[in-house]
Image: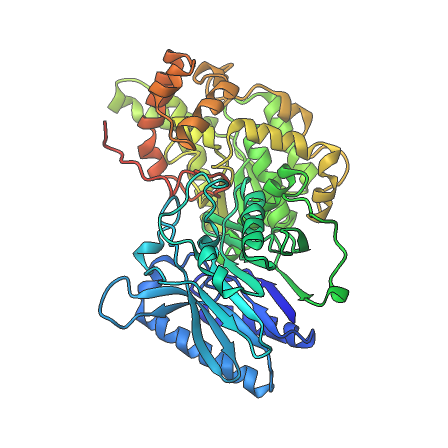
Amino acid sequence: MRLALAQLNPLVGDLSGNTRMILKACEQAEAGKADLLLTPELSLWGYPPRDLLLQPERLNQQKEVLDQLCRDLDQRHSDLTVLVGAAIAIQDGRRPALYNAIVQVSRQGWRPVAHKQLLPNYDVFDERRYFRPGERSSSLVLDNGLRLGLTICEDLWVDTELQRERLSGPDPVAELINDAPDLLINLAASPFDASKPSLRQQLAARAAVRLNCPVVYLNQVGGNDELIFDGGSFLLNPKGEHLLQLPFCKEWFEIWDSEPSHQPALPLPLPLPPSDPRGLLFRTLVLGVRDYASKCGFKQALLGLSGGIDSALVAVIATAALGPEAITTLLMPSPWSSRGSIDDAKTLASRLGIASQTVPIASLMQSFGSSLAPALDGEPQGVTAENLQSRIRGTLLMAVANQQGQLLLTTGNKSELAVGYCTLYGDMNGGLAVIGDLYKTTVFALCNWLDSDDSSRCRDDFGLASQGELVGEAIRTKPPSAELRPDQKDSDSLPDYGELDALLKLLIEERRSGQALIAEGFSPALVERVERMLRRAEFKRRQSPPLLKVSPQAFGTGWRLPIAAA
């Protein structure tokens, strides 16, 4: 059998456009004389379609595009069979009224052949709102007699030894043992976090050994809102060793021939994840920015450039994603901005080849102060005055972005967002928080990597200078500071970032209690302080722009704490 794998980047809700994408893959598969074409989970819809699934007209449109797909195959007298991810209606008057399904499509017509059994309802996933779980595992016998075991994404995640948590419910892999499939197929839409590439491979390898057959894992690629799907599809032999590996963070099409003489010679097992996780993280963030901008209709982006490390990293990512000609930066120095920060910002913009404009805000600060003096019985002081600077900058950035039709990128990191070290309607203004899921220590690590020789291949792939500094030593080594008052340092208001980030990871990603952490030896005063800041900042996070999720637990749709709570 010649098997075609289409690692696609669909646009959520664009059933017609996604069908055209699948048709293009069909043409490639036919040209390569493939027998079977695989597409990712919910490939007609893009993942996650969320409440678009509740619109009856879209479900009617799905039938139309599936019918058209069959007609197009028939007009070309194609013998190709295609497996497509779709949402199939259940006509029994109960809700949810859909299956997350695999549909078999050919010139003879289309029919559902598998229903997803394990429906994730944790973190960013909410599938039980829309789908009903399938009742049994499914096999599909092709005309050539080959038996395919069919699973959808979470149906493969059934190994309690490998997973931190496993959904309650059946074991779809175990149910296929008696069917003795010749090949197990898993169509997926699995978003990125750093641990997943290796974990997916391990889960698939266990399934291959249990069923004594090859396993194909086909993942969606591309950014959809806060989620970034990293692709990285692969095919394993019955021993769990790699026969085929597709790239990460790229749309890709590949044909695999089951005849041993036609199989590529790859080292077994192929190392997963890629040897440098920082490179994969950078590529994932670039993909997230590129797709968020393009899928929302933006061709240009704007950000405020301060000379600090956060805005520097965002500038590099945005330049790699959209190209230097599409990036504009504003430098908005106040009387407290150091000469070094201004020079560092200008040098970075020049190094990246991006446009920069300088708009001093001293006169605006004076105007705000004098205007507020009657209401405050004196000019603003302390945090109020500091926040005014941030809000002046946020207003200027929004005005420029509005006027020029640009996507405004915020530059705050996860550490700041966690403890509320950010200003509503100020530095939080924008349409996308690029590094809102990166702790400050990760920001430093990624910038250090970007300025090292290890990043040269990745930089070259994105048209960035492959030699020399990008971020710059001056930016990487200066003490972090918001520069909102004379000689201000982040350490004046926050614990050391190394201590803070270690504690935040435990509180946020592992949901550990403060009492448990104190019992393990953390300073009670530090734990109580950080817990208090984390809890009190919830109202800010609720009003923040969407961020690119790259960790197991990000702020956003998967973080659902109340604002008014004990």
Viewer-proximal residue among 212 and 428: 212
| Quadrant containing the C terminus in the rendered view | top left
344, above or below 23, in the image: above
Residue 319 on image: x %, y %: 62, 45
Residue 300 appears anywhere in the view: no
Residue 127 on image: x %, y %: 36, 55
Q: Residue 215: which quarter of the image? A: bottom right
| Quadrant containing the N terminus in the rendered view | bottom right
- Residue at the extreme front of the image, as rendered: 178
Write the residue at 64% across / 46% down: 320
Viewer-proximal residue among 566 and 481: 566
Q: Residue 52: which quarter of the image? A: bottom left
Residue 539 appears anywhere in the view: yes
Residue 59 on image: x %, y %: 36, 71
73, above or below 253, in the image: below
Viewer-proximal residue among 68 and 201: 201
Viewer-proximal residue among 387 and 181: 181
